[in-house]
Amino acid sequence: MTKQVQELDHVIIRFAGDSGDGMQLTGDRFTQETAVFGNDLSTLPNFPAEIRAPAGTLPGVSSFQLHFADHDILTPGDAPDVLVAMNPAALKANLKDLPRGADVIVNTDEFTKRNLSKVGYETSPIEDGSLDAYNVHAVPLTSLTVKALEDLDITRKDAERAKNMFALGLLSWLYGRPVEGTIAFLESKFGRKPEILKANLTAFHAGWNFGETTEAFSVRYEVKPASLKPGKYRNITGNTALAYGLIAAAQLAKLPLFLGSYPITPASDILHELAKHKKFGVRTFQAEDEIASVGAALGAAFGGSLAVTTTSGPGMALKAETVGLAVSVELPLIICDVQRAGPSTGMPTKTEQADLLMALFGRNGESPVPVVAAASPSDCFHAAIEAARIAVSYRTPVVLLSDGYLANGSEPWLIPDIASLPDLSSQFAFATKADANGGEFQPFRRDPVTLARPWALPGTPGLEHRIGGIEKADGSGTISYDPDNHDLMVRTRQARIDGIASSIPPLAVDDPAGDAKVLVLGWGSTYGSIGAAVRRVRRAGHSVAQAHLRHLNPFPANLGDVLRRYDKVLVPEINLGQLALLLRGRFLVDVISYNRVRGLPFRAAELAEAIEEVIAHA
């Protein structure tokens, strides 16, 4: 049968099903093949925090959204063009996000009376006309999979589990995705279980063949590769990019890398990834709790390692005392906070930007720390290197902010030329001998430019010194309760952090025509949503400027001038206005907050409306 091929410039697909239906795996495999094909892409995995919510219920729905295109894109998309719903719960949980005319592929085998009643359907939406606004493709995915595997020596339950591979095969045919990578992946994953391997491969090919032969799909679609900057690319998630950035930073600094960590969603994958790379001098330590993990990391910093601890919001609260100790002893330490929705346990698998004020002020006393934020999944690599640069250059703990959206989302990453990365070993030197005047070692005698103290390895002859959390005398580091000395040390520690501003680039502003009256200023993972919204507003004929902050403490030196250059400044945040509070207090500029705290990234369309409203009143 000859099928019509329709060319599209972009597609947004959402796979949705029960937590046990393998939607994350299905979405990930489709993504990997899309990356190999050469499309630009952005993903949004979305899954429940419960290990296994009741099957077929709304709390148990897991989804994976992928936006791929033949041009540069910035977000996973606002609304899916295609929804693959494996059961009634998946349909009901996602139907509100579908635009009219969207394609809906439903697994009719799961639309039983019992499954319908679990989510409040009295009648099947496939049959009662409630889906008339959409292009519905009713496909018995489960029974087709079981039929395709009936000659294999596996149980019916195992056969049913392969229905996600049938769906993947069907969608791979529908959008012309390569298959070689998925076949190799299955062979690697199930190579020791030949019957399970054969079942998954058979189901995958059956789904492809079903699309090729059925009359239910008369059109297949083509999205051509994107014109990306020349170079070698790989698909990467934020957590993996951050792990690679830490490894690269340690290599650039010629230091061993130590990670002290306690597993917590959504930061755990950084620990998992770093544990694979012992050949690069990486040591990973899974501690018994958050406090022990940061304590071990600080000890490793004292011993001369590039020391890191990873966590999410609740863990940041537990690490606060030891981070304060790191401020006091002035040792390099990177604290990676992969933010999630709070407070308390909150929504562990959902994203948020609400830890900014905690990163800045969540310790007792005057304890300033630099704060760096990643803007996209691939940018986590470069943000990690920048955090390491600041930590080793200025002998300070640094908070690196990511979040759940960046951590689990993915995009193509242009693998950088090693020669383009900074030589961090030139940023510091270990102390090797006492002061030139022949006196005792002065552990708090500072570099006149950076105000950083010497980094003395324990056990080095002549560099014995006292260290701890009690206030120290300037220079000698001996215990001091002198009021004037304490005032001096507090101000010196603050000046050391303030001085970092001289080593960071000025804030860049994207204002093509130079006549914009409105600036949209963001930080962290809002970069993609803001960028996509600004593109929409400009296409509508409006002039608007955009800037994005990587350094949140200290701010770029020109930030105040940038803010005062525009009549209105809009600050979108996935919190209740934390950066806006800082900007108002620091620069006395009445910025406009735009806030949504739904556990999800901003939608470009709603953000574009907010920008246009501000422009209308500028």
Image (cartoon, grey):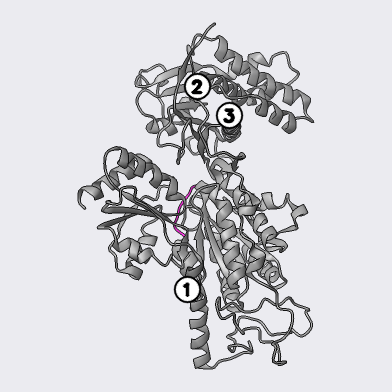
Q: Residue 375: percent from the left, percent from the top?
A: 48, 51
Residue drawn at (62%, 84%) of the image: 444
Residue drawn at (58%, 20%) of the image: 142
Q: Residue 117: percent from the left, percent from the top?
A: 45, 27
| Residue position marked by numbered label 1 in the rendering | 498
The range drawn in magenta is: 349-355
Kind of residue indicated by mark 3? Phe
Whether residue 467 is in magenta: the answer is no
SS class, disc 3: helix
The secondary structure that dominates the magenta segment is loop
| Residue position marked by numbered label 3 in the rendering | 37
Quick check: can you spot residue 66? yes
Q: Is residue 485 above or below residue 138?
A: below
Q: Is residue 80 above or below residue 462?
A: above
Whether residue 353 is in magenta: the answer is yes
Q: Nearer the viewer, residue 592 or 389?
A: 389
Q: Would residue 65 appear left or right of 388 to someone viewing this image?
A: left
Q: How crowded is mark 1: few (under 14 residues within 10 Å), some or many (20 or more)?
A: some
SS class, disc 2: strand
Q: Which of marks 2 and 1 is nearer the N terminus?
A: 2
Residue located farthest toward the left when viewing the structure as drawn: 617
Quarter of the rendering containing residue 38? top right
Q: Mark 1 and 3 residues: CB-CB less than 8 Å, in contact? A: no
Q: Which of 58 and 538 is in front in this view?
A: 538
Quarter of the image with the N terminus is: top right
Q: How far apart are marks 1 and 3 (CA)?
A: 46 Å
SS class, disc 1: helix
| Residue position marked by numbered label 2 in the rendering | 222
